[in-house]
Amino acid sequence: MKIKAIVTLKEGVLDPQGKAIQQTLNGMNFSEVNQIRQGKYFDIEVNIEDEKKAKAKVEEMCKKLLANLVIEDYKIL
Amino acid sequence: MKIKAIVTLKEGVLDPQGKAIQQTLNGMNFSEVNQIRQGKYFDIEVNIEDEKKAKAKVEEMCKKLLANLVIEDYKIL
């Protein structure tokens, strides 16, 4: 089954890429944008039929590879 | 309010980055991973209180800047 996961920078960690996107949008007449933070999205297809087990496996992958827990948080959708 | 958006490669578009992550995971004893596709995640804070209007604005940003519609799809969460 397919599991989706999101990895985002923790609150307080600077996100220069998001800042650059925000400034570009402001310059394109999207003046209503206050802040943008960019993260990573993963669509993971695993050979596990049980949803709970599949999510637990994806969580393990996030901890070991996909997220840097010092500066990033992950969320399984 | 905060609006979240996801930008992913369209089906059929090669994703070498996702493939590299998949191979790394397979090599780390996550043999149950069949496929990984990576996308981008955006957390956008806009100065608009109405949810419907805010989402419409974010959709416009996706079309104009955040997604390359030739090879990517976007989804407002």
Image: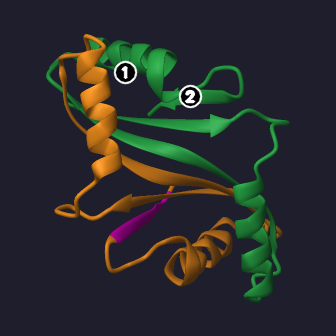
Chain colours: A green, B orange
The residue at the point 46 percent across, 44 percent down is: A41
In the shown orientation, is residue A41 left or right of residue A70?
left
Point out the tag, 1 or 2, that comes first from the N-terminus.
1
- Residue assigned mark 1: A58
**Image quadrant where one finds the N terminus of chain B:** bottom right
Q: Chain of mark 2?
A: A
In the shown orientation, is residue A10 left or right of residue B62?
right
Q: Chain of mark 1?
A: A
Is disc 1 surrounded by few (<14), some (14 to 19) or many (20+) residues within 10 Å? many
Q: Is residue B66 above or below residue A44?
A: below
Bounds of the magenta segment: B72-76
Residue B73 is one of the magenta-drawn residues: yes
| Distance between mark 1 and mark 2 Cα atoms | 10 Å
Kind of residue at disc 2: Tyr
Q: Callout 2: helix, strand or loop?
A: strand
- Residues tagged 1 and 2 counted as in contact (Cβ below 8 A): no
- Residue assigned mark 2: A74
B67 or B17: which is nearer to us?
B17
The residue at the point 46 percent across, 22 percent down is: A65
Q: Which SS type dominates the magenta stretch?
A: strand
In the shown orientation, is residue B31 left or right of residue B4?
left
- Looking at the rendered structure, which numbered label has been put on residue B49? none
